[in-house]
Amino acid sequence: MPGAIHAEGLVKTFGDVRALDGVDLDVPEGTVLGLLGPNGAGKTTAVRVLTTLLRPDSGHAVVAGIDVLRRPNDVRRSIGLSGQFAAVDEYLTGRENLRMVGQLYQMSARRAKARADELLERFHLADAADRTTKTYSGGMRRRLDLAAALVVSPPVMFMDEPTTGLDPRNRQQLWSIIEELVAGGTTLLLTTQYLEEADHLAHDIAVVDRGSVIARGTADELKARTGGERVEVVVHRQDDVATARTVLGGFGKAGAVTGDAAVTVAEHTRRLTVPVTGGAKLLAEAIRELDARGIEIDDIGLRRPTLDDVFLSLTGHAAEEADDQGRDTTSGPGDRAEGTAS
Ligand SMILES: Nc1ncnc2c1ncn2[C@@H]1O[C@H](COP(=O)(O)OP(=O)(O)OP(=O)(O)O)[C@@H](O)[C@H]1O
Ligand SMILES: [Mg+2]
């Protein structure tokens, strides 16, 4: 399939670090794959390999129907890339940057100008178009870099954390641009730290940790795998947290982690969360049991797992908690109690 991305057994080591440890990926034509993982998981390394910027130690990849290792130049002509760190020329204006990209891709000067104007408008950069980009804010550079990746409309796009550093309005705007692109047939691989973004945009999600894909599926499939619903309770008194934990532990679904350990507790907000199977009936039982123990409840409800829950249960830490290297091996299910799922 000409617009698809396919990778098998990608390995890349940097000294002792196995940045990619046998990564397989498949992105069907016209779909979006969200690559999700903590800092240092290997997301950028995977993008660099697939976009021919880095040679893997082993494995192979085909992008837009072209072998990445054998014909890198042809691959480059068929893809667009917006990297994690904006790659704009500081000494050119926004408009000049975009025109230059058009001309590199052999557009006529006139066509390149028209395309630059169109993109500057779309990315809210028209007012700053004639300033050198070294005067741009971080979010403006980010947007210019994304615009540059869209000057030509390549069949396959790679975006490495496209919305990091964008304010909510610009993030929404980029989401709708991405949706339009994909509706037009573009295949997209996108990395993100924002689980909400993957949930919103990606047809499929691959969760990466320490150089390996540890789970894949649609957002719904991953959520279902993480254990159906959760009962979430906020108790009124701090003193009741421990008892409530024991009560809720008894309702936790059978699995690797049971009893008290299955309950996530945010002490300061007195919020307890436990994965359950059994839905509304179980919720009613939980309320009765807590009431029987004289525990006053501020809030209680049943909710579906979020991608945050998925991330937490797969990697042992919340997305935003991952350390710089993504090598945090200390937090297991037992000690992920404080302030995680809220
Ligand atoms: N050029 C390099 N030289 C040495 N080590 C590297 C190099 N590039 C990446 N690494 C290491 O490989 C691992 C994966 O890095 P990578 O940049 O792919 O992670 P990431 O998932 O993109 O993380 P982030 O969310 O922080 O962007 C890290 O441990 C990183 O330190
Ligand atoms: Mg990265």
Image (cartoon, helix red, strand yellow):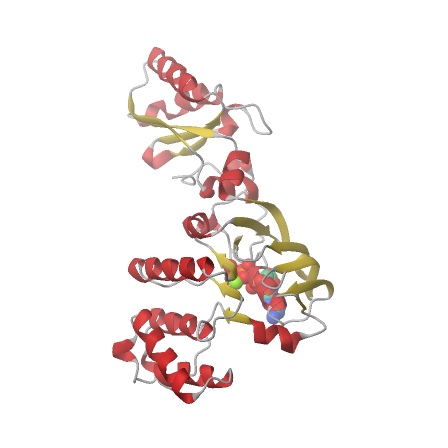
Q: Is residue 123 visible?
A: no
Q: Position of residue 284 (x, y in %)?
A: 37, 16
Closest to the observer, 94 or 282: 94
Ligand 1 appears in which quadrant?
A: bottom right
Residue 255 falls in image quadrant: top right
Residue 72 falls in image quadrant: bottom right
Q: Position of residue 69 (x, y in %)?
A: 70, 71
Q: Position of residue 282 (x, y in %)?
A: 43, 18
Closest to the observer, 204 or 193: 204
Q: Position of residue 184 (x, y in %)?
A: 46, 61
Quarter the C terminus occupies: top left
Q: Residue at x 50, y 38 (%)?
A: 223
Q: Residue at x 30, y 85 (%)?
A: 130
Closest to the observer, 341 or 181: 181
Closest to the observer, 210 or 310: 310
Side (left or right) of 123 relative to 212: left
Side (left or right) of 94 relative to 73: left
Q: Residue furthest right?
A: 58
Count of labels in the image? 0
The correct choice, above or below, for 4 with respect to 94 in the image is above
Quarter the N terminus occupies: bottom right
